[in-house]
Amino acid sequence: MNPDTVVHWKDLKLARTGIKTEDFAKQGNTTFALLLVNGTFKDQYVSEGGQCAEHWMLTSVTWVSEIERAVSKVHGPRPEPSSFLVALNRTPCNGHHGSISGRGGCSGKLVAELVRIRESLADPDRFDEFFAFTLACTGYYDGPNEEGKPMYGLWTTNYDILALQRAGWKVKALQVGKSLTARGRKLATWSGEIATSKVLVPDEKHPFVKEQFDRYMDQALKWTPKASLPRKPGK
Ligand SMILES: [Zn+2]
């Protein structure tokens, strides 16, 4: 497995943060997220009120203020880079599910956040120079449940992973135990292929069609990030 596509739990250095490893080792109804900025643990989130943990992260004071600070550092006289790492006990739910402004659609929300940050830069092409966004997930949220039925209709598709990567998220598999889960291996393989390929990799279940992808992005961008980003100079 390509080490560039795997994040190891122990490397997050979460001792004394109160984070429970077992919350991230299992994939169930309850979702957990945690945020590290520049290698330092900042906050943890849990699903509540029908919203996923990553929704609560994106609407949290911590996320909003850290994003605003990171963007303002880029606009300063001596631009400085920032790194964000988000760990989840699965992948974010499908970007098309539910209403992007309401419940669900977390992949789309995460996509929209980075698209807006990129657009706020005087030179969007320098995004990678100033930001490293890593999304470390234990595996695809795509599984059939015990009865063999799909879970909730929320499952993550390869479009989601593709859109997240295109937006600027380095989607990696999070290894919590001694080895990756089966879904973690699948995620690491697919995200690695997208990351190293200039051409779009077709998914055998969902053949890639540009029109569909564009529709996906239109939907994702209906999410309005809570951070207020500075306008581009001259606008
Ligand atoms: Zn969600």
Image (cartoon, grey):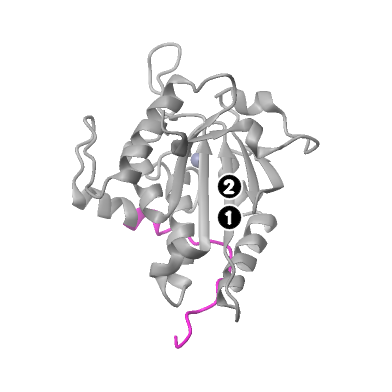
Q: Is residue 155 above or below residue 102?
A: above
Residue sitting at x 51%, y 52% = 133
The image position of residue 200, as x and y in percent, is 23, 46
The residue lying toward the viewer, choosing from 94 and 132, is: 132
The image position of residue 140, as x and y in percent, is 43, 30
Contact, mark 1 vs mark 2 (Cβ under 8 Å): yes
**In magenta segment, residue 229:** yes
**Quick check: 189 left or right of 58?**
left
Q: Which residues are magenta?
A: 218-235
Q: Quadrant of residue 229?
A: bottom right
Q: Is residue 25 above or below residue 12?
A: above
The image position of residue 222, as x and y in percent, is 41, 59
**Quick check: 233 left or right of 40?**
left
**Whether residue 116 is visible:** no
The residue lying toward the viewer, choosing from 193 and 210, is: 193
Q: Tag 1, which secondary structure?
A: strand
Residue sitting at x 67%, y 23% = 22
Type of residue at label 1?
Ser
Q: CA distance from mark 1 to mark 2?
A: 7 Å
Residue sitting at x 49%, y 58% = 113
Single out the residue that lies furthest toward the bottom: 234
Q: Which mark is residue 83?
A: 1
The image position of residue 41, as x and y in percent, is 71, 46
Q: Which residue is mark 2?
A: 85
Type of residue at label 2?
Leu
